[in-house]
Amino acid sequence: MITKICCIGAGYVGGPTMAVIAQKCPNIQVTVVDLNVERIQAWNDDNTNNIPIYEPGLPQIVTEVRGENLFFSTEVDKAIDEAQIIFISVNTPTKTYGKGKGMAADLKYIELCARQIAKVAKSDKIVVEKSTLPVRTAEAIKSILDSTGNGVQFQILSNPEFLAEGTAIEDLLNPDRILIGGDTSVEGQKAIQALVDVYSNWVRPEKILTTNVWSSELSKLTANAFLAQRISSINAMSELCEKTGADVNEVAKAIGMDSRIGPKFLKASVGFGGSCFQKDILNLVYIAKSYGLNEVADYWEQVIIMNEHQKNRFSSNIVKTLYNTVADKKIAFLGWAFKKDTNDTRESAAIFVANDLINEQAKIMVYDPKVSRKKILSDLNYLETRMPEENENSIVTFDNPYLTCEKAHAIAILTEWDEFRKYDWQKIYKSMQKPAFIFDGRNILNKAELEEIGFIYRGIGV
Ligand code: UDX
Ligand code: ADP
């Protein structure tokens, strides 16, 4: 019987996943640990609206189970020692140095976790990879754990997370599937069963799929590559639509009604962002190359190339349309997060579009309902394209969308927040410089209505 679970990493994956496990398994004590003291303090904040991750439905669950059977702590060793199952849910960014720079996943945080577990564990443990990892990482983890020589037995499982941000709680409560990969040995199968039992508290058996470790690891990368590929495919068509007079929304609808294609993930946009798609594809490309599979690598790399093109195309289009110069012009950004209903900005198209426009000496006014100025500046500074002071001077942030757009030469919609649809666009139009342009990077506004008001409207693929 599993009674104690520990999760290393209190991030976008670890936090919500463990909150749901705790809620659905009242007999299991779940402890989420992190080295980041500030982050753990935020998870323990009395007001659950201040927890570090914005995810609809999450504060309610945390209020319900925190202090009962869900705990957030910085005492990593203690939690490892007590747990029967340890989830590793730490970050695996793309490497920024050395071999595989810009392509391979940086596994240093994973390795540190494995070493920590090896050092502390005094009883047998099931170690679960939750972070997205390159194929055969489990082997590396196992080799570190098995070298401790203190007789403790470890079983390594792969249990990738498919939740999407903004709908994490819904995805966790009603998953399309739970994937668990493990060793084919008797011990391996026992470990798989222990984890199946945890999920069976709320997920129907036919939705729980068990495979070998490598299939599970590769399935995660494949799922993200396929999803991203759909977006790059529709974005490629969006450019063709703009040239030919077709409307990409109509094309998406027409093809989506083919049940073999399906309607989801066909929204043309300024480009996909998020912590997973680009990283996972780069990782896939790196793995393919390392096996000498150059055609496979090139095929998937094209998904990223198309996405880069889509972001660049958006910023160049703004410059071109504003009479080939945006120097000293005010461009109002509505949205900075990589998608709606999240405060996550990792790889958000907004960062790259802003960077391009600052290169053209534009002034960027930003409003995002959930993203702070500090985050916006740190996203830009991370690119290291210019001195931080220059970014400070080029970005003005607001907590009111109407003030953001006042005297702006153009508005760019970067995130599809629902509230943007409901604004008083007549009022915004009045306060702007004329001609007033809108570049709708998400195709969420009503073109006909805006043109009626007087805006010059440019969508994606329309
Ligand atoms: C993704 C996967 O969906 C999820 O299964 C995996 O576990 C993690 O990676 P996430 O990055 O949270 O989830 O968001 P997702 O909804 O997939 O969106 C990714 C990006 O694609 C966003 O920038 C979004 O705006 C964009 N997108 C999505 C489009 O541009 N068009 C679409 O049709 C769908
Ligand atoms: P993800 O989106 O995969 O959840 P995040 O970056 O949001 O990634 O969260 C990962 C968390 O893991 C961070 O809060 C980081 O501090 C934590 N972390 C990284 N390495 C360790 C470690 N060795 N021990 C404990 N926590 C760690």
Image (spheres, rainbow, N blue to C red):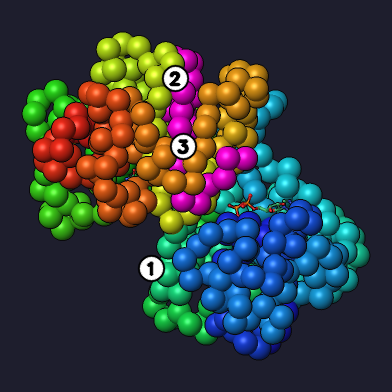
Look at 70% across and 26% down and name the residue there.
Answer: 98
Q: What residue type is labelled 3?
A: Val
**Does residue 361 show up magenta in the picture?**
yes
For the C terminus, the quadrant is top left
Q: In which quarter of the image is residue 45?
A: bottom right
Q: Locate residue 212, reporting x and y percent.
A: 53, 61
Compare residues 422 and 441 and report the one nearer the observer: 422
Compare residues 410 and 407 and report the one nearer the observer: 407
Name the residue carrying label 2.
362
Q: In which quarter of the image is residue 441?
A: top left
Badge 1, how many Cα within 10 Å: few under 14, some, many 20+?
few
Q: Which amino acid does label 2 sit on?
A: Ala
> Looking at mark 1, is its residue's CB closer than 8 Å to ligand 1?
no
Look at 46% across and 37% down and name the residue there.
Answer: 366
Label 3 SS: strand
Q: Is residue 89 above or below residue 135?
A: below
Q: What stretch is highlighted in magenta?
A: 351-374
> Looking at mark 3, is its residue's CB closer than 8 Å to ligand 1?
no
Compare residues 42 and 332 and report the one nearer the observer: 332
Q: Which mark is residue 366?
A: 3
Q: In the drawing, does residue 242 fall left or right of residue 170? A: left
Q: Locate residue 298, reporting x and y percent.
A: 40, 27
In primary-sequence order, the first of circles 1 and 3 is: 1
Mark 3 and mark 2: Cα distance apart in space: 12 Å
Compare residues 395 and 120 and report the one nearer the observer: 395
Name the residue carrying label 1.
176
Q: Which amino acid does label 1 sit on?
A: Asp
For the view shown, which residue lies furthest in the right direction? 150
In primary-sequence order, the first of circles 2 and 1 is: 1
Badge 3, how many Cα within 10 Å: few under 14, some, many 20+?
many
